[in-house]
Image (cartoon, coloured by chain):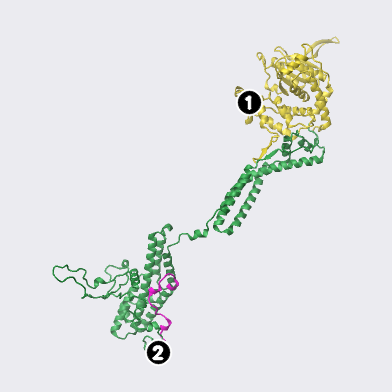
Chain colours: A green, B yellow
């Protein structure tokens, strides 16, 4: 049979003991919340440690954001822990049971809360009799661990990611340089697309190798060789353009048949070397030289030859302008300046009216004697050992044009060298008396024909410098 | 129809009841020396309207206790020595053919069960048929003979005894009938001091003087007061968890074949209330439940064969359950530790 519990008793005692019960419930619930939050806080601490290290590695400006993210994560974890531990939370009634049992109150609190009987006296000494004791070791150690990890993340020296990026592997410098050359040449339309494509293919072949192998000797050697060969081919192109331009200009201005034949031959040779070179000109010069057969060049009218010379000059200017923009190219390898504004025909002087080279508007360099070639040019450049064709040897030496053997057809005539035997009469030929050994290596001129590579030519030039 | 709510005791009523019970306790302590716990349990059983099974060796004062209790309460008591040839009618009473007004008719001759306190000595020596007749009377508090129901006097209390030795030719009470006893109390042997006091103060054949401290009416009032002792829900929850923990499926009750029944929970509740009143309190408490748990539960747990072979006893299992089942049913977080007060 139920018992009537609608009896009011001692509200002051009720407030006192209910406050104690609520305090006990809050303490227990805080323990549940802590036990649910601490593992997550540990995980956040570990993740936050790495986040701080990453932020310091990337940029110090990210560190406050990392701290903010850690704080937000801890707060969110706290909210989640509250929801997760809520089912285990202690009610005030349950805390009352704990309180009355530990204090030996014989279920008096529960009875009084139900309205049966008075609340126990408020003078019960609770010191040392509180139902629960906090075991703070584990929570404190976990929190200390999290704090230590975060502090360590701020204290550990961390390298700058920028330095790491600077240490990253880059393509071989020579390949990059050649690529820039080709880009500039394409932009200026100084070489034809096929030549540029061939060089780019060779660059790609180098870069197709594994990145780890980019700094190997073979790769660097290949890139260096590519750069040297490309520079040499560009220099050869510039020289051939200059030679062709000069030959065309001379042919346009030379009435004498002997000079005309020589200039015609020189123009044909230059045109052929332009066609066979590793680099071919683009634009008008290439088209014009491509159209005209070598044999038909001699039949061109003076106006056509002048147009051809102007086209070749323009192409050479583009070539020099492009390479001037591109870094790391020795412009001196392209030969002397010849397209200055002062060298343009003035159109008013007698020479201009007669169709001869303008002397009025010629620049100082162009006005000097010998301009136009090894026979008529201004002579040796200052501080130069001399023309490559004349290295100061006692014998006449000619430099053959660089030829690409792989592109040659079988039986193709690669070069024609004008040379003759130059026997050194004063050379020591050994003892003339009997019983001596006949001298060896007493040869003729053709065996002395030099086939120096551009690199070797540079070496020789540096030697004489 | 919902029964009217009982008015709970107030502190003054509880104190007054405790004083009466204290007088009864002191009176019985003058009868039976050195058995205060036994006396308290018997008083609790009386107040809770329960029957008590006493188990102990002969000569420990069981009969004297019953006689003293009857005299202290001014109640009518009977004693029946159970034997194998005892018939149910010898307990409940028999119809007797009598001539009344010139006509012969059967009239009911009440048996010894028609007393306020019945001492059933060595109940396990009677046949099951006779045992069941008594146990039915204990449960129903009435006797039906020849289709006629006769109510037993109020209060009605059976104190049965059984001897743990000389088991040959006995009929152990079945578990279902044991369940009808509120308590099963082991009567311990007397200590040296107690024996010395007995020798000094008692004489064979001379019964002790016992004053009447409570009459039947007052006892009934005390029994009604027990019903008004408040059972707080947390204490009821503790009782429920304790009884449920005796189920064989519970790991704590390993070795138990049959656990305690809901009647055991009711017995625990009634006994805890009565003990609370004995202490002068208006409500039952966890301590009351713990104090009465052993005599309430020990005869309601049936152990399996393996547990008995291992030497496990119901007392050990109940003690283990009392240790394992806390009053506060929720665990504490690891960051907190329950303080031992």
Q: Quadrant of residue B242?
A: top right
How many neighbours does mark 2 have within 10 angstroms: few (below 14), some (14-19), or many (20 or more)? some
Q: Is residue A215 left or right of residue B76?
A: left
Residue A32, by quadrant, is top right
Above or below, B159 against A247 in this view is above
Give the labeled residue for mark 1.
B257
Task: Report the chain holding disc 2.
Answer: A
Query: Circle 2 is placed at which residue position?
Result: A349
Quadrant position of the C terminus of chain B in the picture: top right
Does residue B93 appear anywhere in the picture? no
- Look at the image and give the residue range highlighted in magenta: A323-346
Mark 1–mark 2 distance (CA, rounded to whole Å):
137 Å
Q: Is residue A369 visible?
A: yes
In the rendered structure, the answer to whether residue A3 lies left or right of residue A424 reads right
Instruction: Confirm or deny contact between disc 1 and disc 2 (CB under 8 A).
Output: no
**Does the magenta-highlighted stretch encompass residue A177?**
no
The quarter in which the N terminus of chain B is drawn is top right
Label 1 marks which chain's residue?
Answer: B
- The x, y position of residue B33, in whole percent, is 76, 19
Above or below, comparing residue B98 to residue B317 in the picture: above
Q: Is residue B197 above or below residue A136?
A: above
């Amino acid at each position: 049979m139920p018992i009537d519990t609608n009896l009011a008793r001692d509200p002051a005692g009720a407030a006192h003991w209910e406050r104690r019960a609520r305090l006990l419930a809050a303490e227990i619930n805080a323990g549940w919340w802590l036990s649910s939050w601490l593992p997550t806080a540990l995980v956040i601490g570990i993740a936050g440690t790495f986040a701080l290290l990453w932020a310091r590695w990337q940029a110090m400006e990210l560190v406050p954001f990392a701290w903010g993210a850690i704080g937000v994560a801890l707060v969110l974890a706290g909210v989640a822990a509250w929801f997760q531990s809520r089912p285990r939370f202690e009610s005030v009634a349950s805390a009352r049971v704990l309180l009355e049992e530990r204090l030996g109150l014989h279920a008096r609190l529960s009875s009084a809360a139900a309205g049966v009987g008075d609340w126990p006296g408020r003078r019960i000494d609770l010191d040392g009799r509180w139902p629960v004791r906090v075991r703070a070791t584990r929570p404190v150690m976990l929190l200390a661990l999290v704090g230590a990890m975060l502090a360590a993340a701020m204290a550990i020296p961390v390298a700058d990611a920028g330095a790491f990026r600077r240490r990253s592997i880059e393509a071989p410098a020579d390949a990059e340089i050649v690529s820039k050359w080709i880009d500039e040449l394409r932009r200026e339309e100084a070489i034809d697309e096929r030549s540029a494509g061939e060089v780019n293919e060779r660059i790609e072949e180098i870069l197709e190798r594994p990145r780890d192998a980019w700094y190997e000797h073979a790769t660097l050697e290949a890139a260096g060789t590519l750069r040297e060969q490309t520079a040499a081919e560009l220099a050869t192109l510039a020289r051939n353009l200059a030679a062709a331009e000069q030959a065309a200009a001379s042919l346009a201005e030379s009435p004498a048949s002997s000079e005309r034949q020589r200039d015609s031959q020189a123009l044909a040779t230059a045109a052929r070397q332009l066609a066979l070179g590793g680099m071919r000109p683009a634009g008008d010069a290439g088209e014009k030289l491509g159209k005209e057969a070598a044999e038909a060049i001699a039949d061109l009218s003076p106006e056509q030859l002048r147009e051809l010379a102007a086209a070749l000059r323009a192409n050479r200017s583009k070539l020099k302008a492009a390479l001037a923009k591109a870094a790391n190219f020795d412009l001196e390898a392209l030969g002397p300046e010849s397209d200055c504004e002062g060298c343009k025909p003035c159109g008013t002087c007698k020479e201009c009216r007669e169709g001869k080279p303008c002397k009025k508007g010629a620049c100082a360099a162009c006005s000097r004697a010998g301009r136009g070639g090894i026979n008529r040019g201004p002579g040796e450049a200052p501080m130069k050992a001399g023309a490559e064709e004349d290295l100061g040897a006692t014998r006449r030496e000619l430099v053959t044009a660089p030829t690409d053997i792989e592109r040659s057809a079988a039986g193709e005539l690669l070069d024609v060298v004008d040379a003759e035997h130059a026997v050194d009469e004063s050379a020591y030929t050994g003892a003339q008396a009997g019983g001596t050994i006949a001298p060896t290596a007493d040869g003729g001129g053709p065996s002395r024909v030099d086939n120096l590579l551009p690199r070797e030519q540079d070496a020789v030039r540096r030697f004489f410098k | 129809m919902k029964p009217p709510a009982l008015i709970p005791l107030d502190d003054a009523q509880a104190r007054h009841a405790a004083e009466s019970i204290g007088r009864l306790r002191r009176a019985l302590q003058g009868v039976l020396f050195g058995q205060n716990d036994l006396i308290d349990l018997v008083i609790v059983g009386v107040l809770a309207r329960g029957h008590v099974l006493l188990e102990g060796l002969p000569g420990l004062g069981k009969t004297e206790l019953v006689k003293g209790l009857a005299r202290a309460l001014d109640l009518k008591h009977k004693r029946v020595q159970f034997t194998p040839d005892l018939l149910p009618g010898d307990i409940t009473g028999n119809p007797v053919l009598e001539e009344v007004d010139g006509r012969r008719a059967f009239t009911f001759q009440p048996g010894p069960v028609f007393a306020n306190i019945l001492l059933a000595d060595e109940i396990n020596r009677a046949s099951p048929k006779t045992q069941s007749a008594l146990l039915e009377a204990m449960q129903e508090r009435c006797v039906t003979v020849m289709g006629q129901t006769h109510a037993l006097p109020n209060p009605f209390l059976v104190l049965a005894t059984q001897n743990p030795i000389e088991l040959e030719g006995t009929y152990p009470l079945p578990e279902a009938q044991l369940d009808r006893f509120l308590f099963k109390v082991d009567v311990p042997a007397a200590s040296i001091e107690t024996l010395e006091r007995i020798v000094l103060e008692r004489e064979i054949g001379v019964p002790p003087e016992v004053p009447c401290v409570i009459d039947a009416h007052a006892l009934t009032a005390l029994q009604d007061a027990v019903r008004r002792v408040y059972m707080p829900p947390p204490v009821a929850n503790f009782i429920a968890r304790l009884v449920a923990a005796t189920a064989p499926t519970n790991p704590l009750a390993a070795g138990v074949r049959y656990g305690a029944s809901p009647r055991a929970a009711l017995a625990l509740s009634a006994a805890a209330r009565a003990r609370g009143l004995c202490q002068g309190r208006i409500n039952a408490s966890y301590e009351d439940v713990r104090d009465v748990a052993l005599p309430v539960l020990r005869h309601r747990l049936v152990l399996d064969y393996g547990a008995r072979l291992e030497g496990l006893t119901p007392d050990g299992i109940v003690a283990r359950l009392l240790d394992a089942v806390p009053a506060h049913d929720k665990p504490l977080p690891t960051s907190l530790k329950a303080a031992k007060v």
